[in-house]
Amino acid sequence: MDIKEKILMGRYELGRLLGQGAFAKVYYARNLTTGQSVAIKVIDKEKVLRIGLMNQIKREISVMKRVRHPNILQLYEVMATKTKIYYALEYAKGGELFDKVANEKLQEHIARKYFQQLINAVDFCHSRGVYHRDLKPENLLLDEDENLKVSDFGLSALADSKHQDGLLHTTCGTPAYVAPEVITRRGYDGDKADIWSCGVILYVLLAGYLPFHDTNLVEMYRKMGKAEFKFPSWFQPEARKLVLRMLDPNPVNRITIPKIKANSWFKKGKLSKEPSLNKASGSGATDVAENQDLTKPPNMNAFDIITLSPGFDLTTLFEEPRQKTEARFTIWRHASVIITKLEEVGKRLGMKVGKREAGLLKLEAMKEGKKGILSINAEIFELTPYVHLVEMKKCNGDTLEYQKVLNEGLRPGLQDIIWNSQDGEQEQQVRLEQQHQQQQQVLIPRKC
Ligand code: AMP
């Protein structure tokens, strides 16, 4: 599939081919308005549909939209024609980290920098309920300043995909990097599995070759299950200890991300900066830091607005079954007023109200319901400083109990600030309702 047209959607001028995956070609491109370099990933819709991978594509889009972080490749926008899907992605000029380690090991301080950035990105994904499941140097790209960018979320899982046992069950990933419990198919924790892959990556960065390698796959899995591997002589004792803790075949005993971050080898030298909210990365990415002003919800970015606006109807691409566990309201008030109101209403309903992060509140029932404690996330998105979209989503508990609280408690409690047709703006309300319907189809659920 060749790109004959040099201009895409009147917005991007396409250049050379950067790379090619199984279902996509990636081209260098320039945004005609801003001059910004981007990478355009061209996916053949028919091929993807034929192989039944459309869900994977949808998931990748949802996930990349959810995780915006300086060390995660940013998805700027998605365009679609009848036959193709185009991702406009952050351009990673430095190519794959794999090329750097294909022939030799890295110096320790360089390996540490990439590893710190990897852990920061993975930690951020996990905090958003996203497990990558295919971490390997081929999926780690570098920008022009040699900053690491995690890419390829095609195999990622959302926390929502957990089975009733709370574990993920799909076996995926790349054999040499995949955790032993993923192979045994008895269910696994996505975060622990990602930590194993990061352990293999750290080993590869410092050794220049894989810890587990055998032409016989069964033999390789056996070695992985027993963590049977050797360190080369140049591997420093502290780094050895950390790798051993990450490559613990028992996921229960495997080191956690907070402990990796507290590890003396990890912390040595100049710590690769943790992302901060207001500091955009080279690409203009923002992320949510812990000390963020809780009254300030995240803005909807151009991508959100484009995908939500009726003029750019991508619903056939994103369409998901309507979830009864979500509701959205438009509110014409400052975010601080909305937060105060939500706290007030929540308390009146006998719920515990906690602030999680930028514009995200968690409402929790005090008593256990039919299916555990009812827990609702109320997330506020800024459309303009005085117009907000509030998304309510059930994160835990019984759906009927949730709907009761929503319809008999939260909705009436917010009635005086929700924008509705009684304000004499019937027509606009209808338009908003339509917009909400579209939002319902494209906004992605967030983990509690
Ligand atoms: P993928 O189909 O995502 O695996 O991409 C195929 C290849 O294209 C990758 O291995 C990279 O070499 C290249 N590539 C993908 N995305 C980008 C990007 N955002 N910037 C630069 N090169 C990329």
Image (cartoon, helix red, strand yellow):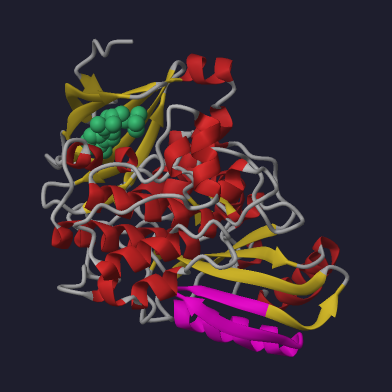
Q: What span is colored magenta in the figure?
A: 334-363
Instruction: Please say whether residue 341 is one of the residues in the magenta stretch.
Output: yes
Residue 69 shows in this picture: yes
Q: Quadrant of the N terminus?
A: top left
In x, y percent, where is residue 9?
A: 29, 25
User: What is the quadrant of residue 36 in the picture?
Assistant: top left
Rendered location of residue 210, percent (x, y): 33, 42
**Vertical placement of residue 64 versus 251, above or below:** above
In this view of the protein, which residue sits in the foreground, 306 or 25? Answer: 25
User: Residue 409: x and y, percent?
Assistant: 77, 77
Labels in figure, total: 0
Q: Position of residue 417 (x, y in %)?
A: 59, 75
The residue sitting at 67% across, 53% down in the picture is 162
Q: Describe residue 33's horizontal placement relative to residue 58 as left or right.
A: left
Find residue 350 and report its image quarter: bottom right
User: Which residue sits at x=36%, y=82%?
Assistant: 291
In this orientation, which residue lies closer to the viewer: 53 or 265? 265
Q: Is 423 left or right of 240, judged from the image as shown?
A: right
